[in-house]
Amino acid sequence: MAITFHANGRIEGTGSTTPYVVGSICQSKKFSITAPSTISATLRQGHPSGIKCSITPISTSPKILIVSYVCYSTSGFNAAYTLRDNTAGTFIQFNPGSSPVDPGIGSPASNGKTKITSGGVGSVGFNNGNHFGCSARTYVGEYTPPNNSTREIEVYMIGINNNGTIYVGRNRSDDNATYDSYSPCELTLMEIAG
């Protein structure tokens, strides 16, 4: 196998043993929705959004830089999103200082601080519950997976203070007006070589 070291710091080679500079991004995977969706949300329960991406680390001790951009609105209640490592079966990327509980899967979680990544859209939904507009929430952070197996990371939507419909990638209103234009939702995973 030929390995070339370039003056600009780039290392080039072939095969599964290609070296990577520790701390550099060695691969990137991205998922974008192609159409908006709706989720029938239950209070304090995590609902898979379908916004998910998989990455198979190529370094032995990887870190994953996660960038999520999710636009959503609701039918007049507070909602948030959280990130979940579906491979490990655990919610990730939340503030551990609040001693949060996992959102329920299949049934609501107990009341209290919950593992959320994005924060909510207000007690009556985005923009005081009107139908025109959605909240764009971005998260950027580093995740250290428990091993270097293939990881599937997914956005889960959560009803915070009520049951109702969460509109992902669109407004609550969908009347074919300019203010009803659809919004992008993306999840990008970048492996940081370790």
Image (cartoon, rainbow, N blue to C red):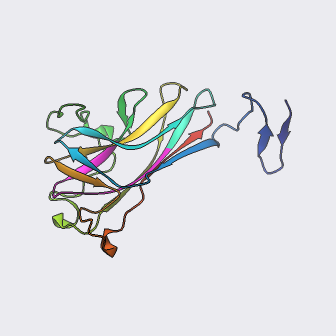
From the viewer's perspective, tell me whether residue 126 is left or right of residue 190: left
In the rendered image, residue 102, in percent from the top left (x then y), is placed at 26, 33
Q: Residue at x 32, y 60 (%)?
A: 170
Q: Residue at x 30, y 39 (%)?
A: 97
Q: Residue furthest bottom?
A: 178
From the viewer's perspective, tell me whether residue 71 is left or right of residue 76: right
- Quarter of the image with the C terminus is top right
Magenta stretch? 66-82
In the rendered image, residue 169, in percent from the top left (x then y), is placed at 35, 57
Q: Is residue 53 above or below residue 136?
A: above
- Locate residue 154: give its quadrant: top left
In the rendered image, residue 38, in percent from the top left (x then y), is placed at 27, 51
Q: Main secondary structure of the magenta part?
A: strand
Asked if the stretch drawn in magenta spans residue 163, the answer is: no
- Locate residue 85: give its quadrant: top left
From the viewer's perspective, tell me whether residue 142 is left or right of residue 117: right
Asked if the stretch drawn in magenta spans residue 67, the answer is: yes
